[in-house]
Image: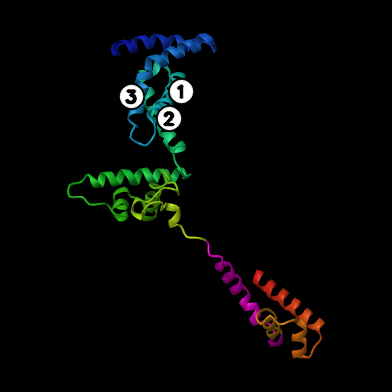
Amino acid sequence: MHEHERPAASDALFTHLVGLEPGREREAVRAELVQVWLPMAHRVAGRFRDRGEDIDDLRQVAALGLVKAIDRFDPTQGAFESYAIPTITGELKRHFRDRTWAVHVPRRIQELRTKVRTARHELNERPGSHEPTPVDIAAHTGLTLEEVTAGLAALDSYATMSLDMELDWAGDGYSLRDTLGAIDRAFDTTVDREAAKQGLRRLPERERAILYLRFFEDMTQSSIAERFRISQMQVCRLIKHSCARVREEALA
């Protein structure tokens, strides 16, 4: 069907579609309208081909938008193409917004990303331009510096890199994973030590000395009892009481 024949043919189909109840006949008429307008939907999808998505996937999304446009179109409100193109475009934009981000990003941040990206493009197009700074982008868009920073960060959230990706500059077999640091278990010890320090300082001198001899000098309870001239049972009770007090203060 030629371009100039399509509107006249689809007008009659739309008029027929409006009067049909749900059923096989309505589905057949709608399918015929989809075939008539599918090339237009594919052209709209083609505008998004350079954004990292497969063109066949984009055409499927555009076809879905076309079906929605056909179902919602009122023939008395004007030309179908004027209604369908924004509907299909909106469906494609929703696809990119909701489906293609490698990292979940709130919609507000996605909107900031779009504004920041557009502003960078516009500023780079100016004669004698340089790479715009966050301050330049904020002045151009009216956004705050914090909003621009969030939008710039979101530019890197659209796609991710595998940790197993080899780094060209680092030599054979050296991957992004190799650049990541490991968890230092000594940090936990340091935190625990600092948490217990104040409680230990508040203990009586004899109890601090007993804990030091038991846990740092590795002396037995009987040896500590002999040094302080008390019973081993007293040493055991003092150690338990002191540890419980320090633990309670650290957790509090």
Residue 72 can be seen in this image? yes
Q: Amino acid at mark 1?
A: Lys
Of pointers 2 and 3, the one earlier in the residue sequence: 3
Question: Magenta segment, principal secondary structure?
Answer: helix
Mark 2–mark 3 Cα distance, whole angstroms, equals 14 Å
Pair 1/3: label in front: 3
Quadrant of the image occupied by residue 214: bottom right
Horizontal side of residue 233 vs 195, given as left or right: right
The C terminus: image quadrant: bottom right
Residue that appears at 34% across and 10% down: 8
Residue 68 shows which numbered tag?
1
Asked if disc 1 and disc 3 are in contact, CB closer than 8 Å, the reply is no
Asked if disc 2 and disc 3 are in contact, CB closer than 8 Å, the reply is no
Q: Position of residue 39 (x, y in %)?
A: 35, 19
Range of magenta residues: 183-206
Circle 3 is placed at which residue position?
43
Question: What kind of element bears circle 2?
Answer: helix
User: Which of the pair 225/27 is nearer the observer?
Assistant: 225
